[in-house]
Image (cartoon, rainbow, N blue to C red):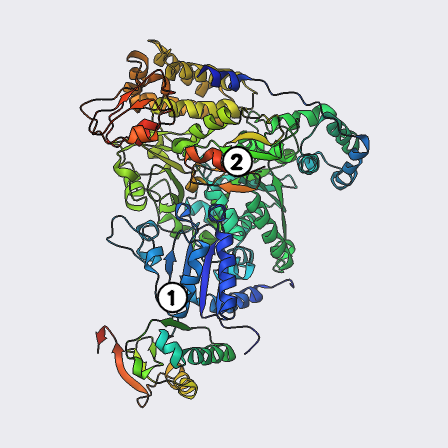
Amino acid sequence: MQERDALLKKKVQDSVEQIPRDKLELLDPIIEKYQGSTSYLIPALKEAQEMFGYLPMEVQRKLSKGLNIPAPHIYGVVTFYSFFTITPRGRHTIRLCLGTACYVKGAKEMLEIIVREIGINVGETSKDGRFTLEAVRCLGACGLAPVMMIGEDTHGNIIPSATLGIIEGYQ
Amino acid sequence: MCASPYYRLQIMMCAGTGCIASGSLDVRQAFERELTKRNLQNEVQIVMTGCNGFCAMGPLVVVYPDGVFYNQVKPEHVPLIVEEHILKGRVLEKLLFKDEKAKGRVPLMKDIGFFGLQRLIVLRNRGLIDAENIDEYIARDGYAGLAKALTEMTPEQVIEEVKTSGLRGRGGGGFPTGLKWEECRRYDNFPKYTICNGDEGDPGAFMDRSVMEGDPHSVLEGMAISGYGIGAEQGYIYVRAEYPLAIQRLQKAIEDARSYGLLGRNILGKGFDFDIAIAPGAGAFVCGESTALMYSIEGRRGMPRIKPPRSAEAGLWNQPTNLNNVETFANLNPIILNGGEWFASIGTENSKGTKVFALTGAVTNVGLVEVPMGTTLSSLIFDIGGGIPKKRKFKAAQIGGPSGGCIPLGMEDVEIDYESLQGVGAMMGSGGVVVMDEMTCMVDTARFFTNFSVDESCGKCTPCREGLKVMFDKLTDIVEGRGQEGDVEFLIELGHHINNTSHCGLGKSAANPVLSTIRYFRDEYDAHIRDKHCPALVCPDLIDFEVIEEKCKMCGMCFKNCPSNAIVWEKKKVAWIDKSKCTRCRTCIMNCKFGAIR
Amino acid sequence: MPRISIEDLKKIKEEQKGKMVLRGGSHRAKVTVHMGTCGIAAGAREVMNVFRELIAEKGIQDVILTNSGCAGLCAKEPMITVEVVDLAPVKYVQVDKEKARKIFEEHVLGGRVLEDYALAIGSETMAV
């Protein structure tokens, strides 16, 4: 129990990776597409995140200049919405549904197994860069509870003890 | 052979998120392969439909004209279905749905209690049309409601019709839709906007996803009707980021509607301009709140603001804005076509029409059901839902998500409408019904919802941001064995403070799950605090992990399943748990059929 | 796709309705081709195809064509059952392409039973 708590309380590690300057130029078409209105910020951030996998400071700064939106505003939006991240992701994102239906059907056990066996807490990435663990509110697939998404694949009707077996299938 | 083949048989495949996750796309491929192999591709048509609602039994396949309903179909079943059913006309018994009440298997959709007892208005097209084919929507009277409104009615008459229908907001609040429109029409300030709230955030609710994926045009048509009513020329659909399939289907629907001129300039030649854009969310529960949602569309942090002014006066970009839920919009085509009085004849005195519920948790038929307002909870759970599986007992139903409350055993005869639910301390919310059996700990459930609200609080006002955190810590103390006398009274007092002093609707209802579980399950809180014991055997710190000798049937199931070899057992002997090895994982409890571990 | 008017909306509805009649719309007649192994061997598929072609050719939208298992009288295959709404079902035996065409014209569309080809009136379970 204590071990689990220690893991649960561990802070998210800071990113050290840098994005090279020439790669930042990839943002230009996005900037061109979404220039003109603050209301395009969320779609623009989404596309930028799809490109880099995350939204580090230098990407936010570049978007700020290009879209003419103050950087603090962008930072505020990025940190407000759970969809955006400022730290790099693992190769596979595990999205464990912790909605009510999944919760009463064993998602809690699944979370404990992942925290214990993979050694990552919600919001963290494993050291080998293989997995990022996310807890999501409800994937809207309650009929299949408990549900876990790995990348684009949705796994449903999971027996908690089978959790690891499913995860191990992703390299 | 002529150019367009006559299909004698149609295979309707459910392509909702649930069935796709269960593998419906593989099944479709298998059908395509098999049909081509037997040269039947011009005889049999495969139609991909939206969510059928019966997600637990997916992938679902319905074969028309017979209406035979196959469930849990796997690719390896396909050759057999083609050989037996499609070629020889013999129904495949083993893949039919098995109703626990009716003896044997019932093949026809209309005979299945789950489908037979429902009344479909919002879900009128579910499983019947190809979600990506606008013509099929039109065939089922699609856009006829909009056409009627534009040709035969003035905007005022449209609003009057909606008022007559008694339709109330299906997203949770239950505000009369007609009044909302009337208010928005009154403001002479242009442009105006109409917004569809597709930020379905309540855990355990997925009816909006089902409608957006399975019948996207019904949402677009409802929005166009509302735009005509209030005088708006631009609509937005705010869809949460977790629903990529819904975004994709809506996008296709918007493009198709534009090319038919059903969106855009001079719709149907009647001089009405209206267009719709999709605004994708980015993962924030609070954006389901109307003012927060509008900030989010504007590209800002989605934090609610204090009302007034109401959105009808100053909403999106400070312009008059109408906001309705997906399900509300889907009701409009039938209301305009059949008249407000027809709609008002369904339901109870103050709650008209039907409501879609997402039935989940410990219930046999998990899925989406649409029933008239006023249906009893027990009918919903037992007649349609098929009751509680594994011979367990019904304990409570949680209605209304993190803003709602529990309805316990003994009160399951409550009629479901806005007022009755509020009377028993729950709320309609968006219509998620999570059924709980005796294996659910109510304190743990309350903690779960509070944790959800702590995570999703936007942080703007103190009662919600800080109060909920204090509540969560107190609940954690209780489930981990540090509860003290007076904790429950403290929770009640704090809960009332949070509900009374928060800014927005979410904060004002965030303490409901705790207050309602205390109201009905006080004894469970007391057992946690005084006896340091969790009666439902859920909270690991409050379980003794001892075998009750009188109850043990010596079957050895606990021994066989224990992952840490902590159970000592021999044939014909009572099991014993070695506490030095036990990791309190509860595997033994879940595997004991006799409730012999405490 | 062109912009449409209210008349077009109605036209699309009528056209599509025919294609969707299988899913529970109204129909005036139903033709069942009995397609057990014996029926298929005796040529039931050709009979089925004749009906499909006729339906497509004439653009008929309210006739359902379906198949079922062996009718039990293997010696007289291929067999079909024609059910016109409000009339008793009729079973035809030893149907070939030519007979199928006639049955379609006379019985399915015209409502006149072709007694020469018929085996019996009524279905297996229901005597008339």
Element type at marker 1?
helix
Q: Report crowding for label 1: few under 14, some 14 to 19, many 20 or more residues within 10 A (C-alpha).
A: some
What chain does badge 2 belong to?
Answer: A
Frontmost residue, B345 versus B454:
B454
Are the residues under marks 1 and 2 on the same chain? no
Element type at marker 2?
helix
Q: Which of marks 1 and 2 is in front?
A: 2
Residue under circle 2?
A: A168
Name the spot of residue A56 as percent of width and height, x first: 71, 27
Q: In which quarter of the image is the C terminus of chain C?
A: bottom left
Residues marked 1 and 2 touching at CB (< 8 Å): no
Task: Check disc 2 and give the amino acid type.
Answer: Glu
Residue lying at the far top of the rendered structure: B485
Q: In this view, does C110 lie to the left or right of B156?
A: left
What chain does badge 1 belong to?
Answer: B
Name the spot of residue B532 as percent of width and height, x first: 31, 14
Residue under circle 1?
A: B84
Name the spot of residue A135 as percent of width and height, x first: 52, 30
Name the spot of residue B264 as percent of width and height, x first: 65, 53
Q: Is residue B258 above or below residue B246?
A: below
**Distance Cα–Cα, label 1 vs label 2:** 39 Å
Frontmost residue, B381 versus B288:
B381
Task: Check disc 1 and give the amino acid type.
Answer: Glu
Q: Report crowding for label 2: few under 14, some 14 to 19, many 20 or more residues within 10 A (C-alpha).
A: few
